[in-house]
Amino acid sequence: MKILGVEQMLEQKFESFLEPRIDEWFRKYLESPKGEAMISKILADVMMSWMKPGAGEERTYLESVVLDLVGRMKNNPGFRERLLAVMSQKSVE
């Protein structure tokens, strides 16, 4: 029985050390360039999963969202440059 008590005590100590730090580590990671890249990739994957073939030239949900975002950011020169760079890349498909 004493072994179980020691294990529980060690587990509680470890949790009390780790739990407050996990949130801070996770937040710092998400704010880092690698974290931002991961979030961007996840959001791109989610948006692509929403994309469905439209009938003819009708807008899809994803296309509407992208066009709305581009419309809101069109006056940002840095965004325009990055958008043009992406649009001018050759497709890898």
Image: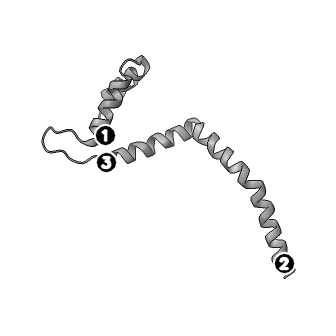
Q: Secondary structure at mark 2?
A: helix
- Circle 2 Cα neighbour tier, 10 Å, few/some/many (<14 / 14–19 / ≥20): few
Which label belongs to residue 3?
A: 2
Secondary structure under the numbered disc 3 in the rendered image = helix
**Residue at the spot x=24%, y=48% of the render?**
52
Residue 11 % position (x, y): 77, 66
Q: Secondary structure at mark 1?
A: loop
What is the C-alpha distance between the residues marked 2 and 3? Answer: 53 Å
30 over 6 or under it: above or below: above
Q: Residues within 10 Å of mark 3 (few under 14, many from 20)?
A: few
Q: Alpha carbon of mark 3 to alpha carbon of mark 1: how far?
A: 21 Å
Identity, as a three-letter code, of the amino acid under mark 2: Ile
Looking at the rendered image, the quarter that the C terminus falls into is top left
Earlier residue among tags 2 and 1: 2
Q: Residue most toward the bottom?
A: 1
The percent position of residue 13, horizontal first and vertical second, equals 81, 61
Q: Which residue is mark 3?
A: 50
